[in-house]
Image (cartoon, helix red, strand yellow):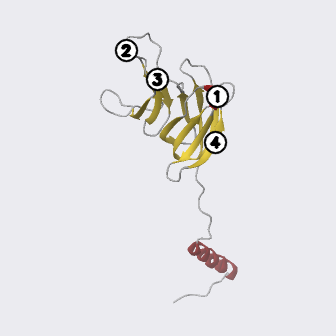
Amino acid sequence: MLRPCRRPLVCWMLVLFAVAALLGLAEPAAAAEGRLTGQVTDGAANPLAGVAVELIDPGAATVVGRGMTDDAGRYQVRASTGTYDVRVTPPASSGFATTVVGAFAVGTDSTLDVVLARSDAELVVLSGVARDRGGAPLPQPTSVHLYPTGAGLAPAASLTGRAATGCGSSVARPTS
């Protein structure tokens, strides 16, 4: 048997809250804000200014965040945390090729440094999971440097980033 409510105002507030929740009027929790920062350079580690960096929702193919590199090649893009394709587009007259890093996990403070290749060079696209000799994914942050066979110690290309799974893609120029 139900007892009468001794505080009618409190009872009505509880009833209204329950109805709002059932109708979906209660505000959902906001997604955490993510931030992607980094630097865009050429193969000789020179910073590249005026490069557009965009976060693309792979399911909808829409741009959800956009930034531009400064004179030091540094950029910052804000969007909700999640996994995005990162499109790096240099100015058309720069001679560098657009690069897409697929399925990059953007957290509350993620870093992705990108080395752009010349657009007139033959390009090789690298993609996968960086692993140690035992086969386990490398801890974060991960840096992968590609060295040409028979050359000095300067890397031909580099990919540095902090992704939840150690996954990433980069573009490198062949050296032979």
Q: CA distance from mark 1 to mark 4?
A: 20 Å
x 50%, y 42%: residue: 105
Of circles 1 and 4, the one toward us is: 1
- How crowded pointer 3 is (Cα within 10 Å; few <14, some 14-19, many 20+) is rated as many
- What amino acid type should be assigned to the residue bearing mark 2? Thr
Q: Secondary structure at mark 1?
A: helix
Q: Position of residue 145 (x, y in %)?
A: 44, 22
Q: CA distance from mark 2 to mark 4?
A: 37 Å
Between disc 3 and disc 1, whose residue precedes?
1
Counting residues from the N terminus, which is met first, the one under dot 2 or under dot 3?
2
Q: Eyeballing the image, is 39 above or below 56? A: above
Q: Amino acid at mark 4?
A: Arg
Mark 1 lies on residue: 93
Q: Position of residue 109 (x, y in %)?
A: 58, 38
Could one spot residue 113 in this view of the protein?
yes
The residue indicated by pointer 3 is 173
In this view, the residue in front, 82 or 168, is 168
| Nearest to N terminus: mark 3 or mark 4 | 4
Determine the image quadrant of residue 41: top right
Q: Give the image location of residue 67, x and y in percent.
A: 65, 38
Disc 2 target residue:
149
The residue to which callout 4 is attached is 66
Tag 3: amino acid:
Arg
